[in-house]
Amino acid sequence: MARFLGFLSPVGLRWLNIVVRSIHLGTSGILVGGHAFEVPAERLVPTLVGAIASGALLTLLESGGRSLWLHQGRGLLTMAKLLVLCLVPIFWAHRLILLWGVILLGGIGSHMPAFLRYYSLLWRKVVPVEGLPGAGQLISENLAQMGEEDPRA
């Protein structure tokens, strides 16, 4: 992803992430609220498209275009959210409960500790990614455990 957004500084990428995340929260909230208040489905299509598009862009920003993300806690929770969303058309009568499940998974994924967010099920260890939230602390801790000094300090 950095190749495509190489013109943005790290600060610019962070602000893009904040803006996209805010759009995603807003469109997702309208979508869930629309279902809660039984707004006709056709009126919710624009917010559904907005939630999907912003979620896809957020996934690209968060993953940094790396496959590592797919087997870390942060990627696994995102894929679990997608799985639950895929259940909505099948269990339409229970869509509100499913959508609340998606919100719950999203809240957990966004606020879980870095050692869980960056834990790789494939490699069975924490694999921090430089420059992402919480990663700096994990890198420092990993270096300290190995008896090495953090060159960034």
Image (spheres, grey):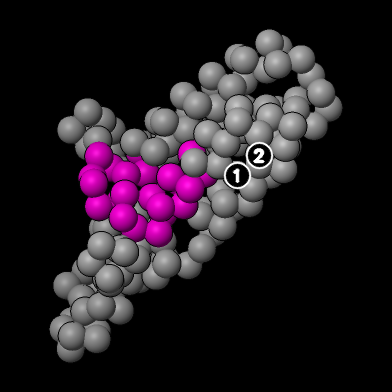
Is residue 77 positioned above or below 120 on the image?
above
Residue 87 lies left or right of residue 1; in this view the side is right
**29 magenta-colored:** no
Tell me what residue is drawn at x 53 percent, y 34 percent: 86
Question: Mark 2 sits on what residue?
Answer: 99
Contact between labelled residues 2 and 1, with CB atoms less than 8 Å apart = yes
Is residue 145 positioned above or below 127 on the image?
below
Residue 61 lies left or right of residue 26; in this view the side is left
The residue closer to the viewer here, 42 or 54, is 42
Q: Quadrant of the C terminus?
A: bottom left
Q: CA distance from mark 1 to mark 2?
A: 5 Å
Tell me what residue is drawn at x 60 percent, y 14 percent: 46
Q: Position of residue 91 (x, y in %)?
A: 66, 34
Q: Position of residue 49 (x, y in %)?
A: 54, 19
The local secondary structure at tag 2 comes to helix
Task: Count every numbered label the image shows and give the total.
Answer: 2
The residue closer to the viewer here, 50 or 15, is 50
Q: Residues within 10 Å of mark 2 (few under 14, many from 20)?
A: many
Q: Position of residue 121 (x, y in %)?
A: 31, 64
Q: Which residues are magenta?
A: 61-82
Residue 102 shows which numbered tag?
1
The amino acid beneath tag 2 is Leu
Q: Quadrant of the N terminus?
A: top left
The amino acid beneath tag 1 is Val
Tell me what residue is drawn at x 57 percent, y 36 percent: 87
